[in-house]
Image (cartoon, helix red, strand yellow):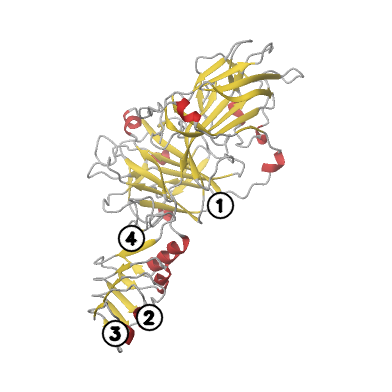
């Protein structure tokens, strides 16, 4: 994923944004482009192009926003750029907090961070209550500041729910005196949205994933609405206003605090003499991004090499914004065709002073991208372009089946000293399942084994454990569990049950003998009483120990 870097002692953290394998920074550094050409990608692609305009009434009454502005590691509310960032303690219970003592001139919310030294944990998750099926923009911000006494930031993964959406690599940004941010757009498929960090093969031994700030913004339904969010999320690659040398545009001009980076480029620029009607745009861009535009003279093509860096071969959401920069009049219109790497993106676009936008999604891109606007024959003026957004379309990694998640959450509530990584999705992404949890390979995932032997846990065995109907192995030996052994008769797939060396009391459930696949039961060294059910003592092929 592309990271965006932020200057440390000027405006609030503004930058340009990313794709899932590249961090976003100023300047932006990306990995080498895929050898697959954009022409090859295009030949197999399906895409959608729409001229975008919606009535004002469609966005006049959005649902109440549920936003979170978090200053990680802070003990106090931090005010910055008209926004208030709260401490992160309500959203995470793991990790350590620290204050950067050698960086007094950075923005307030970058002076603290939370880091995660436990290398045994598969991931470390922040949990945000959200509106199920609502759309959110998630922004993660990182400033290393040498918090651990090192000279180079660690590299690690970032995850939303069950999907890895980027590799955090802030090395170049930090060396250049900047911080980095990443941005994703996702629909919440549950009532909790988890934002997680995890070590990967590039994380040096002895280093810790860290984070400075998180923003979660509730978006209007219209924003990026041509995306299939049931199967994908979006990761921001670039968001620019063209022909501009002004400051980066963010909050309050953009109520969702999206960062619009100015890009002067080599084309002539012109200031707008009219106001765009931004409320009619699906993505509701800020009016300030229409203040100037890149342009070409009468009869000339307008060409942009944008984004200004090569892209990995993938499918992208591409939104372009246009406005006739002349004063409103009956002649305030322009007509031109748009080409993307030589392929027709839109034909005979007729723009006015009110403004228009054009979207292509999914659009295949690879390497350097060239956008060419060709004026209609005998057009009295040349093409113009005001702004653009590029976001990579990333397939979702799937989810754990809801009833398994609910059952495991109830099981966890009855325990003390559960593993540190028991937050977020229990099974996904693959390689980042909760400690002691094994899952099926198919998505949606089922929990097939729990092995928490010798974790020193105390508490009770919640009856909801019986709702994990895909469970094959339940291994809870050598802990300090008390209370009764619940009825496990619903676990028809259970093969192995180990509850030895605990403090369970009461009778042995007779339903255990009715489990058709059960081969091994160990209940030794507990305080169980009563008779052994005949269903167990006479069960053929059962290794039963008590």
Q: Position of residue 219 (x, y in %)?
A: 57, 44
Disc 4 element: strand
Distance from label 2 to label 4 (Cα)? 24 Å
**Pointer 3 and pointer 2: residues touching (CB < 8 Å)?**
no
From this viewpoint, which residue is outermost toward the front? Answer: 540
| Mark 1 crowd level (few <14, some 14–19, many ≥20, 10 Å Cα) | some
Give the mark nearest the N terminus, 4 or 1: 1
Q: Position of residue 512 (x, y in %)?
A: 35, 79
Name the residue that disc number 4 marks.
437
Give the number of the mark in front: 4 or 3.
3
**Pointer 4 and pointer 1: residues touching (CB < 8 Å)?**
no
- Mark identifier at residue 511: 2
Distance from label 4 to label 1 (Cα)? 27 Å
- Mark identifier at residue 133: 1
Residue 77 visible? The answer is no
Residue in view at x 47 percent, y 24 percent: 369
Give the number of the mark in front: 4 or 1.
4
Give the number of the mark in front: 3 or 1.
3
Give the mark nearest the N terminus, 3 or 2: 2
Give the mark nearest the N terminus, 3 or 1: 1
Residue in view at x 38 percent, y 75 percent: 488
- Mark identifier at residue 538: 3
From this viewpoint, which residue is outermost toward the right? Answer: 330
| Mark 2 crowd level (few <14, some 14–19, many ≥20, 10 Å Cα) | some
417 to 373, vertically: above or below: below
Looking at the rendering, which quadrant does residue 333 occupy? top right
Disc 3 element: loop
Give the mark nearest the N terminus, 4 or 3: 4
Distance from label 4 to label 3 (Cα)? 31 Å
Disc 1 element: loop
Looking at the rendering, which quadrant does residue 477 occupy? bottom left
Q: Quadrant of the C terminus?
A: bottom left
């Amino acid at each position: 994923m592309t990271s965006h870097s932020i200057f440390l002692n000027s405006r609030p953290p503004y930058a340009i944004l990313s794709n899932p394998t590249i961090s976003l920074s100023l300047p932006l550094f990306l990995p080498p482009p895929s050898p697959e050409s954009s022409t090859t990608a295009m030949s197999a692609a399906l895409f959608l192009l729409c001229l975008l305009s919606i009535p004002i009434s469609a966005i006049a009454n959005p649902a109440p926003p549920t936003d979170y502005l978090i200053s990680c590691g802070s003990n106090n509310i931090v005010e910055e750029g008209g926004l208030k960032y709260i401490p992160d303690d309500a959203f995470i219970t793991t990790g350590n907090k620290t204050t950067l003592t050698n960086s007094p001139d950075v923005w307030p919310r970058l002076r603290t961070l939370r880091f995660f030294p436990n290398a045994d944990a598969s991931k470390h998750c922040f949990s945000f209550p959200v509106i199920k099926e609502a759309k959110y923009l998630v922004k993660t911000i990182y400033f290393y500041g040498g918090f651990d006494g090192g000279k180079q930031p660690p590299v690690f993964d970032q995850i939303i729910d069950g999907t890895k959406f980027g590799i955090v690599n802030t090395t170049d940004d930090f060396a250049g005196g900047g911080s980095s941010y990443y941005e994703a757009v996702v629909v919440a498929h549950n009532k909790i949205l988890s934002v997680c960090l995890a070590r990967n093969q590039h994380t040096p031994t002895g280093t810790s994933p860290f984070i400075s700030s998180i923003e979660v913004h509730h978006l209007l339904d219209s924003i990026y609405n041509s995306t299939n969010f049931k199967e994908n999320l979006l990761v921001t690659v670039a968001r620019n206003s063209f022909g501009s040398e002004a400051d980066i545009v963010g909050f309050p001009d953009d109520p969702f605090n999206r960062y619009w980076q100015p890009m002067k480029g080599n084309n002539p620029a012109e200031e707008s003499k009219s106001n765009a009607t931004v409320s009619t745009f699906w993505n509701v861009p800020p009016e300030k991004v229409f203040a100037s535009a890149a342009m070409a003279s009468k009869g000339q093509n307008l060409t942009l090499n944008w984004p200004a860096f090569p892209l990995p071969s993938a499918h992208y959401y591409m939104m372009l914004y246009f406005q006739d920069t002349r004063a409103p009049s009956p002649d305030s219109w322009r007509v031109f065709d748009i080409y993307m790497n030589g392929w027709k993106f839109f034909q005979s676009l007729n723009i006015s002073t009110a403004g228009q936008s054009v979207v292509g999604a999914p659009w295949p891109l690879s390497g350097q991208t060239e956008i060419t606007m060709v004026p209609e024959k005998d057009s009295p003026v040349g093409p113009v372009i005001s702004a653009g957004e590029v976001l990579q379309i990333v397939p979702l990694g799937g989810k754990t089946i809801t009833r398994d998640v609910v059952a495991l959450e109830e099981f966890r509530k009855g325990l003390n000293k559960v593993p540190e990584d028991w937050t977020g999705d229990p099974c996904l992404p693959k390689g980042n399942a909760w400690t002691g949890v094994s899952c099926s390979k198919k998505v949606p995932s089922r929990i097939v084994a729990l092995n928490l032997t010798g974790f020193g846990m105390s508490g009770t065995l919640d009856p909801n454990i019986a709702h994990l109907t895909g469970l094959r192995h339940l291994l809870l030996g050598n802990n300090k569990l008390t209370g009764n052994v619940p009825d496990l008769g619903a676990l028809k797939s259970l093969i192995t049950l180990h509850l030895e060396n605990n403090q369970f009391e009461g009778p042995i459930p007779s339903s255990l003998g009715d489990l058709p696949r059960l081969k091994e039961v160990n209940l030794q060294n507990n305080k169980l009483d009563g008779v052994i059910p005949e269903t167990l003592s006479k069960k053929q092929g059962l290794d039963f120990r008590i």
